[in-house]
């Protein structure tokens, strides 16, 4: 994975004297530790659709699950371009990229994902087994661009990601 770090293009007066940049390590930490991810997809008629998802950020991608019959799953079948953001607008992480069904994951990956989901969501009652996604229902979000800041007027940062996959 290659990452280019720049400033986002903002109108004059928004951030005139930034003093620092957010690190990619900070972004990965936040994406890894977050419980809720807001997934924004586009309906076939062009209207937006947002839904909170639980997921696991691993290897530079967000894995989440859900029925192929849900609105967001149907949306990404026709338009894979989505955005994902976390719940905090003061210390924001906003990712844009593509989403696709994962298919049946390899056994090793399924074990890692099940363990990560259980570690993160067992207290909320969600403990998937490694074979849960054998017939589908697992999705992968691959970020291509991320905007992040901890203090908007001090450190807005743009990451352009080449996944090399």
Image (cartoon, helix red, strand yellow):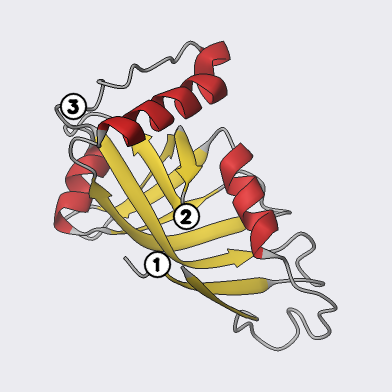
Horizontal and vertical percent for residue 128?
A: 37, 18
Q: Is residue 105 above or below residue 161?
A: above
Q: Earlier in the sequence, mark 1 or mark 2?
A: 2
How many other residues sit within 10 Å of disc 1, few (<14), some (14-19) or many (≥20)? some
User: SS for tag 3?
Assistant: loop
Answer whether residue 123 is visible to the viewer in this image: yes
Determine whether label 3 and label 1 are within 8 Å by CB. Answer: no
| Residue at horizontal 22 percent and vertical 29 percent from the top | 67
| Residue at horizontal 81 percent and vertical 75 percent from the top | 20
Query: Distance of mark 3 from mark 2, alpha carbons?
Result: 22 Å
Image-based side of 73 in relation to 108, left or right: left
Query: Distance of mark 1 from mark 2, alpha carbons?
Result: 8 Å
Q: Which mark is residue 163?
A: 1
Image-based side of 12 in relation to 107, left or right: right
Q: Place residue 132 in its image quadrant.
A: top left
Q: Which mark is residue 22?
A: none
The residue singled out by tag 2 in the image is 60
How many other residues sit within 10 Å of disc 3, few (<14), some (14-19) or many (≥20)? some
Q: Is residue 98 above or below residue 67?
A: below
Determine whether label 3 and label 2 are within 8 Å by CB. Answer: no
Q: Which mark is residue 134?
A: 3
| Residue at horizontal 23 percent and vertical 43 percent from the top | 102
In the foreground, 8 or 105: 105
Residue furthest to the front in view is 108
How many other residues sit within 10 Å of disc 2, few (<14), some (14-19) or many (≥20)? some
Horizontal and vertical percent for residue 154?
A: 82, 72
User: SS for tag 1?
Assistant: loop
Answer whether residue 65 is visible to the viewer in this image: no
Horizontal and vertical percent for residue 83?
A: 42, 57
Image-based side of 45 in relation to 23, left or right: left
Determine whether label 1 and label 2 are within 8 Å by CB. Answer: yes
Query: Distance of mark 3 from mark 1, alpha carbons?
Result: 25 Å
């Amino acid at each position: 994975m290659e990452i280019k770090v720049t400033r986002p293009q903002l109108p004059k007066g928004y951030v005139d004297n930034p003093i620092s940049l957010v690190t990619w390590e900070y972004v990965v930490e936040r994406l890894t530790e977050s419980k809720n991810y807001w997934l924004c997809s586009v309906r076939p008629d062009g209207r937006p659709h947002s839904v909170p998802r639980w997921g696991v950020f691993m290897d530079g991608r967000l894995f989440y699950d859900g029925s192929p019959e849900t609105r967001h799953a149907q949306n990404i079948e026709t338009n894979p371009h989505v955005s994902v953001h976390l719940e905090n607008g003061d210390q924001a992480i906003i990712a844009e990229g593509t989403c696709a069904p994962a298919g049946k994951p390899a056994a090793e990956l399924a074990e890692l994902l099940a363990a990560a989901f259980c570690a993160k969501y067992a207290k909320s009652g969600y403990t998937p087994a490694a074979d849960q996604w054998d017939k589908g229902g697992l999705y992968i979000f691959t970020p291509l661009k991320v905007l992040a800041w901890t203090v908007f007027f001090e450190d807005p940062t743009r990451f352009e990601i080449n996944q090399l996959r």
